[in-house]
Image (tube, helix red, strand yellow):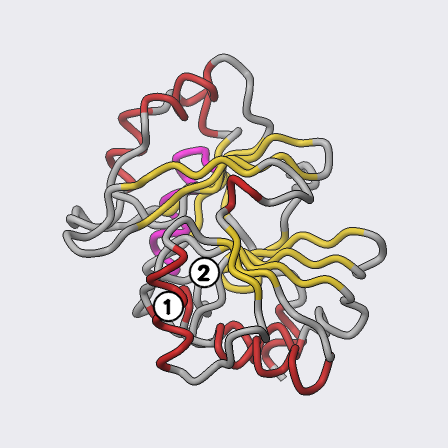
Amino acid sequence: MEKKQTIDFIGNGSCFNTEFGNNAAYYKEEQGKRLLLIDCGESIFERVRKLKLLEKAEEISVLITHLHTDHVGSLSSLIYFCQYVKGIKPTILYPEKEKLEQLLTITENELGTFQLVDPSEYEKFPIEAIRQQHTKVAGAYGYILEIGGKRIYYSGDTKTISEKVIQEFREGKLDEFYQDVSRYDTPAHISIEELKRIFSQNERSKITCMHFDDEITMQMAECLGFNVARVKGLRELER
């Protein structure tokens, strides 16, 4: 039986795996009044509405790993919803604030309807950004978050895992470990074979794989002893 994890998933698919939904997660505090989203790709705003995550939310923060559309594609819509329906200003967390501001300006979100904050300056709980190797042009970040009494690593999209993260994991300093994975050897994501090489059989049960290419990738991760990210409220999303 898998232990209860601190974050729940809205989608767990890779860019082209539209069936699983864009990879994204969330964390709720105070009976849902404070909501943290991790990424907001093309399919995520619709899924957030179906899961009714915004109904009780009085504070909404969105932690962005990078600016590919499967991670920010419906962020603009979420900001509009907060502005016109909720009457609140969401906090958007991303290290490269100027780039994200340019993107939101292009999608015509008004300045002043959202707050852009560097994750290192977030006051609600500690967030440490870790620069990742993803594509040649994408600035991509993983994060170590301290939420719900846990210290969590969330990879975002990356081809490699930093030595710092691996060391902290092996020293028992990380309570939960979420890692994107690919069935294929690509320049953008770590392969399931590489993940198998890095982590021993005993270590794999402490790692949760996400961002799956397909059902086969998920099955391979499970067969190798890794946990897999599952979408909470899947029946509601299929309606």
- Residue toward you, 5 or 27: 27
Are there few (<14), some (14-19), or many (20+) residues within 10 Å of tag 2?
many
Furthest-front residue in this view: 112
- Residue toward you, 65 or 208: 65
Judged left or right of residue 229, residue 164 is left
**Residue hosting label 2:** 23
Q: Mark 1 touching mark 2, by CB under 8 A?
A: yes
Mark carried by residue 138: none
Which corner quadrant of the image does residue 34 belong to?
Answer: bottom right
**Residue lying at 51% horizontally and 30% vertically, measured from the top left:** 205
Question: Is 220 part of what is drawn in magenta?
Answer: yes
Which corner quadrant of the image does residue 42 belong to?
Answer: bottom left
Q: Quadrant of the C terminus?
A: bottom right
**Residue hosting label 1:** 70
- The chief SS type of the magenta part is helix
Q: Residue 210: x percent and y percent?
A: 44, 50
**Residue lying at 51% horizontally and 54% vertically, measured from the top left:** 93
Looking at the rendered structure, the secondary structure element under dot 2 is loop
Gap between marks 1 and 2 measured at Cα? 8 Å
The tag earlier along the polypeptide, 1 or 2, is 2
Range of magenta residues: 214-226
